Amino acid sequence: MTAPLLQIEGVSKAYPGVQANADISFQIGEGQLHALLGENGAGKSTLVKIIYGLVKPDTGRMVLRSEAFAPASPSEARRAGVAMVFQHFSLFDALDVAENVALGMENPPPLRDLAQRIRTVSEEYGLPLDPNRRVGDLSAGERQRVEIVRCLLQDPKLLIMDEPTSVLTPQEVEILFKTLRKLAQEGTSILYISHKLDEIRALCDEATILRGGRKIATCDPREKTARELAELMVGQVLHPPERDARARGDVVLQVDELSLNSNHPFGTSLKGINLKLHAGEILGIAGVAGNGQDELLLMLSGELRAPKRAVTLKGQPIGHLGPGSRRKLGLVAAPEERLGHAAAPDMSLTENALLSGASRKRLTRNGFIDWRGADRFAREIIARFDVRTPGTQVLARALSGGNLQKFVIGREIEMNPDVIIVNQPTWGVDAAAAATIRQALVALAAQGAGVLVISQDLDELLEIADSFAALNEGRLTRVRSAKGLTVEEIGLMMGGAGDMHVAHEASA
């Protein structure tokens, strides 16, 4: 048993109508790799915000290195030795690495001196960075290195990491784990938050599990299976998606030799994309963030226009059509960015259901909106996908990230499309919600829809996909059968070495 670095004693926090944390107590040892687990809404985010000085608890106390610890702000937490790498990077694309690091420091040294410190620290921990490179030109993995090195320059005693591997290849995950183990050996404690339970079992010494705002258990994750951990989190038995044998039908979506410029200054242009999606097929597309996934979804959904005949839906050219026209024809899409793209933050769930479901659910007639029908549609989504919300008039921005994700994906699935394109369908959702979403996608394919899933969760793709391809720098590898593929082979494909390393061929 290591000496405690941070002790959390009886911490509670309530918001109107919600008990986010209820009498939570546990401790993190010095040099310990400690996991914090829980389903969406379990209270992880609130607890971490309390530790990092973003939220003040209602009751309870914390002790850091034998002294009372109650940070009133993140800067106060950092001065006490607590650093955090957030799930969403807070970097400026137009600035270089050193400039971004300086912005996160209260008293940064001259840029020349800082650049040398960045080189030294990044090399010492196996996270090499060029301090003069523009962040907009970095891969997602390199951007995460910037965030981590920025924290390491503060010499933290506790490093909090929120979903740190969501944008990494398997090879990059191994590099990160080596870095974290080295930090732990040197005495830095790590509080690690992730929905990837196999990673928790491989990395962490101890895990605290929250459910409904309360601590359910503290255990050694290495002595549990991933399923046992998931069932502790959600309080129920979980089952993998049921995949009945199904025959592939005709080609429902086809893209031929498509090259398309990104509409973002730091985006990735698509280069020579070819793919065929059959009725009843789930095609999984992997890739590290920033390799063209967003552009591929925008092109397929109609937000980025393509040459008319470069994209066909059930044999009909649609490259020139916008999203509304494609929806009417049976192609729907759910982008990765939930708030602002997949959902309008300041509109209610009923209004958000109407926005994309108007044509396929016939929610307008002669220029008038069927508000009862829209509300009924929203209620159907909430019920089927267990969206935790007080009602359909709640604003989208009021939902937790995981619950909004369930609503957005559920909305598209409930429209019974011929083709559905989803980017990161289970990003940020708990094990039970992920199982629900994956089962719904499998069921949709069983009904004859073509399903294209873009995801950085390789276990997810291997679990549900029939065929597989990877994006690297805007180029798509050949589509192959997913059967027999390993995570290591997929990692090579994601890194641009796919065609020479993977011998599996997709069936004709």
Image (cartoon, rainbow, N blue to C red):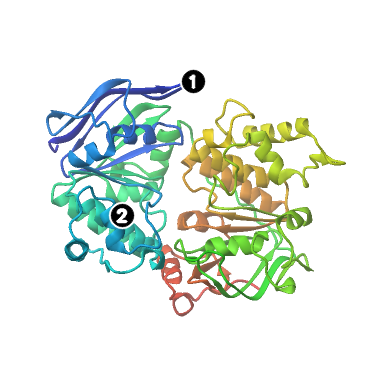
> What residue is disc 1 on?
17
Name the residue type under label 2.
Answer: Glu
Say left or right for 187 vs 241.
Answer: left
Which residue shows up at 77% across the image and 30% down it?
Answer: 372
> What residue is disc 2 on?
147
Q: Is residue 286 among what the camera can see?
A: yes
Q: Earlier in the sequence, mark 2 or mark 1?
A: 1
Between 169 and 232, the residue placed more toward the observer is 169
Between 339 and 439, the residue placed more toward the observer is 339
Neighbourhood count class around disc 2 (C-alpha, 10 Å): few under 14, some 14–19, many 20 upward: many
SS at badge 2? helix
The quadrant in which residue 365 appears is top right
SS at badge 1? loop
Name the residue type under label 1.
Answer: Gly
Q: Is residue 238 among what the camera can see?
A: no
Image location (x, y in percent) of residue 68:
16, 27
Q: Quadrant of the C terminus?
A: bottom right
Between 391 and 54, the residue placed more toward the observer is 54
Q: Quadrant of the N terminus?
A: top left
